[in-house]
Image (cartoon, rainbow, N blue to C red):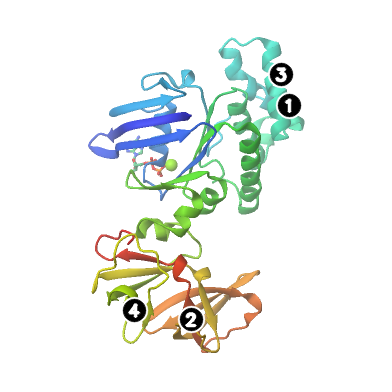
Amino acid sequence: MTSVSVRDLSLKFGSLEVLRTLNLDIDQGEFLVLLGPSGCGKSTLLNCIAGLLDISDGQIFISGKNVTWEEPKDRGIGMVFQSYALYPQMTVEKNLSFGLQIAGMPKDEISRRIERAAEILQIQPLLKRKPAQLSGGQRQRVAIGRALVRDVDVFLFDEPLSNLDAKLRAELRVELKRLHQNLKNTMIYVTHDQIEALTLADRIAVMKGGIIQQLDAPLTIYNRPVNLFVAGFIGSPSMNFLPGRIEGRGDQVRVVLGSGLSVPLDGYEAGEPLRDSLEVVFGVRPEHLTVSREPTSGPSLPAEVELVEPMGADSLVWLRLGTNSMSVRTESTAGFLPEDAVHVTFDLAHASLFDASTEERI
Ligand SMILES: Nc1ncnc2c1ncn2[C@@H]1O[C@H](COP(=O)(O)OP(=O)(O)O)[C@@H](O)[C@H]1O
Ligand SMILES: [Mg+2]
């Protein structure tokens, strides 16, 4: 069942068109992440769904009801912001109950809801404190609690973890995932952090310039990005991109990556026939390359180690390959050193080819 449906949504700030006939359907209970660089329109889209912005054109449905012109409080949503937006003069308990009191909810129902939210979020010991007496992580828990007590169908999050330090961010990320597994509400979550998107989402909508570039499961986006932008935005360290040219046909088709460097493309799943002499960008992630000291039995290319970045569990080895530079993930025990002469093998089943002029996946 569809939980949230955005139909031909357009939004302008003056003459600036931020969203253009955008369409998006989110399933009941789905965790959908809106991912993209700063300024691409993520918050604007979320605020339109929340009813905090008047849209220029289109319609929004929540739980089957057309809410395009409903007030935010009547949309059945709860929203959590990066800035927490707690009332500083109120205790945590009051911050949680305030909205419900305004709505005229009976006292015992309010207490029941606060008790439940406090238990889920482990904030019982904090109820009598004021926001100033809480850490950043605790404040964000309270902000989530305020959405939780409203007992809504849909939660909207706008970069809720961005103000926290790295360790706390990772902890709260796990808690959010647990919360979703337990509650099974629809969640729409805005972030510019691709790790948050990959770890939390059922589906990710990658946005650029107000347009959804790709809407897919995290692993599909990771393994089969539809264009150069999505390929480069997802993955850390980033996918390697090498300029190249398609040569030959059928079984003989290969990508030539500069003088004398040529990779046979059997094993690559092309969405369309590979055209002879097409200019392309060959993309391959650091973990889909293998380096060895001896030539392998299959096709491999000669390269030289430029530098090594140990990362704990594994190491990132930077290679010079003709005029190109590329990174390879290796076991940290492999012990490569700068200036080592090596051989590189590509895992073509996991590689990507993009048309150099359209930047679309081939
Ligand atoms: N109230 C506003 N008035 C004018 N322009 C705005 C306003 N809010 C956002 N914008 C512009 O709209 C674009 C999208 O902003 P936003 O949705 O906040 O991006 P994101 O959340 O992806 O970083 C940006 O170019 C931003 O400068
Ligand atoms: Mg934003």
CA distance for labels 1 and 4: 65 Å
Q: Is residue 219 visible?
A: yes
Sequence-wise first label, 2 or 3:
3
In front of the other: 177 or 16: 177
Q: Which residue is mark 3?
A: 112
- Tag nearer the camera, 2 or 3: 2
Around disc 1, counting alpha carbons within 10 Å, would you say few (fewer than 14), some (14 to 19), or many (20 or more)?
Answer: few
Which amino acid lies under the numbered mark 1 shown in the image of this protein?
Answer: Lys
Q: Is residue 316 left or right of residue 2?
A: right
Dividing the image into 4 quarters, which one contains the C terminus? Answer: bottom left
Sequence-wise first label, 1 or 4:
1
CA distance for labels 4 and 3: 65 Å
Which amino acid lies under the numbered mark 4 shown in the image of this protein?
Answer: Leu
Q: Is residue 109 left or right of residue 75?
A: right
In front of the other: 199 or 48: 199
Decide if ligand 1 comes within 8 Å of the CB at mark 2.
no
| Residue located 71% across and 12% down the image | 108
In front of the other: 4 or 176: 4
- Tag nearer the camera, 3 or 1: 3
Which amino acid lies under the numbered mark 2 shown in the image of this protein?
Answer: Val
Where residue 162 sits: x, y (%)?
A: 54, 46
Q: Using the image, tell me which numbered label, if any, was put on residue 128.
A: 1
Sequence-wise first label, 3 or 1:
3
